[in-house]
Structure formats: C-alpha cells, structure tokens
C-alpha cells in the first residue's frame, strides 16, 4: 500500500467560531493543508450560509436538504459541533476545547465575545500559546470598528466598485464575494505566520484582519497608480489602465480576450492580423503611445477581428505567441481540457448526498511534498459532536504538553 504523504499542518488544531465566508474560507484553507478544524455552530441554526440557497444539495431520496451549495463552498475538511456560547455550559465547553487548540478564528462584532468571556484579552494569559484571529468588517480600532461589515458594502467603500464596470455605466461589484475571500486568504497567511512565531517563541498573538483593510490592499496597481499620480482612474470596462490593446474584442462569432503585454507582442499581432502598418505608425509603436491613442487603435483592432471567427483567431495568435483566450461561461470552464487536467473540480464522497458525493472547487495549491488533502465533505450541523469530544478532550491540553 502506498504511504499517505504528510500534511503540512498535521497536528495543528483550529477552533472555528466564524460564519458566512471570510472566516470559513480561511479555516477551510487551513483544513486543506492538514489542520484539524472544529466548526462551532449555533444549535438549531448553524452557519447562516447553510440556508443561503437555492441550490440545495439533495439527500438520497432526492429531497433538498438544508445544506446549500453556498455553505459547501467554504466548509470542507471540518467537523461540526453545536455549542450555545451564550450559556455557562457552552462557555465551559469552549474552554475545554481551547485547552487543546492552537488557533481560534472568530468573526463576531468587535467586543462581541467579551460578554461570554471569550475575547482575546480574556484568554491570552490562560492560553499563552493560542493564535487568536479576529475577522471583522472594519477592524478592532478606528471610527467604524463597531459597524457590521458585508462584502458588498466593503467592495463599495474600498474602491473596487469605482473601478469595475463599463466606462459609461455605473459602479459594479465583482460577481463573487471577493472581499470576503481575499480577507480569508490574508487571514490564513497571518495565522501561518503567527504559528511560526509561536513555534519559535512559545507565544501566541492576536491577529486583527478586516474586510476593508484587505479590500484596499488588493487594489494593487490601481491603488498605487492613484497614490503616485493623485488622479482618479476612470472605469475602463474590460480595458487595462496601463496596457493597450488589453481587453475583450468581438470576433465574427464570439468574444475574444486580447492581452498584448509588450511592443514585440503588438508587432506579432499586427502581422498576424494583417495590420502591419499599425506597428510602424508612431502613434502605436510603443505602449505609451498606444495608451495615448487608445480609442482609435482599439477601433481599428476591433474592425480587423470581426473578419474571422474566434477559433481562427485563437489558433493564429497562439501560433505566434500573442496572449489571447476565450470568455468562458462556467460550463465551458469545467469542460476545458486544461482545467480538467489540473483537477480544478474535486468530488468528495458524502454519505448523505443523493449522488454519493458533493462536487467542490479544488484548492489551487500544488505542494510536492505535503499535498492538499481532501479528507471530509462539509459537515452537517453537529455531525461530529461525540467524535470531537472523544478525540480532543481525551488528550493532554496544549499547556500540559508545553510544560512537560
């Protein structure tokens, strides 16, 4: 039998008190890397997203369950236990589990866990090695700290909606909860850094990560362009503020992305498109010049591309090393041979699901020595209570092991 490779975070225990998307996406990432993640949920209700459907996953009888596809997207590789932290019994149970945890992740409002005795300041001395990650809309400090934060609000307040949309249209949000997801990724990176520090010093710490801070951080080149020039960027639809031509164009039958990244690629594009005169024209010879004459250049490129079908253009441009590609819908994405070869979809065995499995988006990390491990489908509410208690509480606490 072939040996199972070790997981990078094997032995790390995460107590997950988060709900919705940002926190759960962070803990799912840790779980994919081998951490033992226990998801603490409200009795009878569970994570809010369990009911964020349709679609809902069907059971063996073909009846929709209370598990939505939205919930499935961020909760694999976890075990669920229902605990009412508003009760003394629930708080005692959390403390029992904390004695065995390396990491606690929560996304309550600032100060929301203090009334239960579970705020960082109330725990840090009792559990000195604990990495405590707080995910909020606006952070632990500042004038907006007490506000609730939601992805849509953050996309607006953090500037990305001012950049997204057609030039003559209104602001537009990204089609997925990208502020939540990016916050989850930053949170996971912060947790890994804090664990590294804990392993070196024995000391845990508090991680304060907010949706708004994260959203502003991933404005990347657009945000830095503004800081450098002091000029508000205009919406460019599918265009690029610093590269031309770099956008979606129509062909005779379907849209095509043309992503010309430098002057040499532009010359090769012109030759392939029968537009060799363009790359000799001073208005278009360099990228700086092409930006200054964006509208007229893109009009000429568009007229040329309308003369052939997309498949013809893809073959011709790929042959000369000009970056290009189709605009796929999701069916086309998952049928793409390269996507299939890279394993972007994973089917996890699931005893209660109608088809005997649930289909999820794979983790993109390809680690040669400690690969991502898909051990568990997203749990049903309180599915693992007895298993968790028997597993975690049967062992010495972290503090006991550290003193030995």
Image (tube, rainbow, N blue to C red):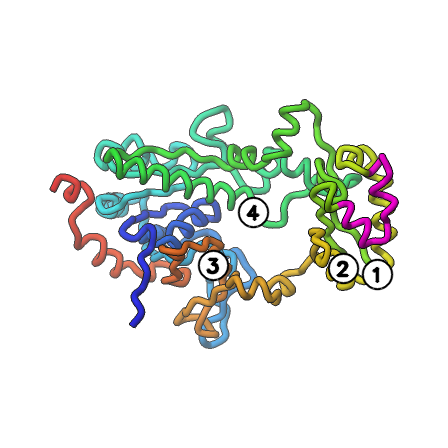
Which quadrant is home to the N terminus? bottom left
Which of the two marks, 2 or 4, is nearer to us in this view? Answer: 2
Asked if labels 4 and 3 touch by Cβ distance under 8 angstroms, the answer is no
Residue 316's label in the rendered image is 2
State which region is magenta.
266-284
Residue 72's label in the rendered image is 3
Residue 308's label in the rendered image is 1
Q: Position of residue 134 (x, y in %)?
A: 39, 37
Q: Earlier in the sequence, mark 2 or mark 4?
A: 4
Q: Which residue is mark 4?
A: 177
Residue placed most toward the observer, 289 or 211:
289
Mark 4 closeness class: few <14, some 14–19, many ≥20 residues within 10 Å = some
Task: For mark 4, give the secondary structure.
Answer: loop
Q: Earlier in the sequence, mark 1 or mark 2?
A: 1
Q: Earlier in the sequence, mark 1 or mark 3?
A: 3
Question: Mark 1 and mark 3: span between their CA atoms?
Answer: 42 Å
Q: Is residue 37 visible?
A: no
Asked if labels 2 and 1 touch by Cβ distance under 8 angstroms, the answer is yes
């Amino acid at each position: 039998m072939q040996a199972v490779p070790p997981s990078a975070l094997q032995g790390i225990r995460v107590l997950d008190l988060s709900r919705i998307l940002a926190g759960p996406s962070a803990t799912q990432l840790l779980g994919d890397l081998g951490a033992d993640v226990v998801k603490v949920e409200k009795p009878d209700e569970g994570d809010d997203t369990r009911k964020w459907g349709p679609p809902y996953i069907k059971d063996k009888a073909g009846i929709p369950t209370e598990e939505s596809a939205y919930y499935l997207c961020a909760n694999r590789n976890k075990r669920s236990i229902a605990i009412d932290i508003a009760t003394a019994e629930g708080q005692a149970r959390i403390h029992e589990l904390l004695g065995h945890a390396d990491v606690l992740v929560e996304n309550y409002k600032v100060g929301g866990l203090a009334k239960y005795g579970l705020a960082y300041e109330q725990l840090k001395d009792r559990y000195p090695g604990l990495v405590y990650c707080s995910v909020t809309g606006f952070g632990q400090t500042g004038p907006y700290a007490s506000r609730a934060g939601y992805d849509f609000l953050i996309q607006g307040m953090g500037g990305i909606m001012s950049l997204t949309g057609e030039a003559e249209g209104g602001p537009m949000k990204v089609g997925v909860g990208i502020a939540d997801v990016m916050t989850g990724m930053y949170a996971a990176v912060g947790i890994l850094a804090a664990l590294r520090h804990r392993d070196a010093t024995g000391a845990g710490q508090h991680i304060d990560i907010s949706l708004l801070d994260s959203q502003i951080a991933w404005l990347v080149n657009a945000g830095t362009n503004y800081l450098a020039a002091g000029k508000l960027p205009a919406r460019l639809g599918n265009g690029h503020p610093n590269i031309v031509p770099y956008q979606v164009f129509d062909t005779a039958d379907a849209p095509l992305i043309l992503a010309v990244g430098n002057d040499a690629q532009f010359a090769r594009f012109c030759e392939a498109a029968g537009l060799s005169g363009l790359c000799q024209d001073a208005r278009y010879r360099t990228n700086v010049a092409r930006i200054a004459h964006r509208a007229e250049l893109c009009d000429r490129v568009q007229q040329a591309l309308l003369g052939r079908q997309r498949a013809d253009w893809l073959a011709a441009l790929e042959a000369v090393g000009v970056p290009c590609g189709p605009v796929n819908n999701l069916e086309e994405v998952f049928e793409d041979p390269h996507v299939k070869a890279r394993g972007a979809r994973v089917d996890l065995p699931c005893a209660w699901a109608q088809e005997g499995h649930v289909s999820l988006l794979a983790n993109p990390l390809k680690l040669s020595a400690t690969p991502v491990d898909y051990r568990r489908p997203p749990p049903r509410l309180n599915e693992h209570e007895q298993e968790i208690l028997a597993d975690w509480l049967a062992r010495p606490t972290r503090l006991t092991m550290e003193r030995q």
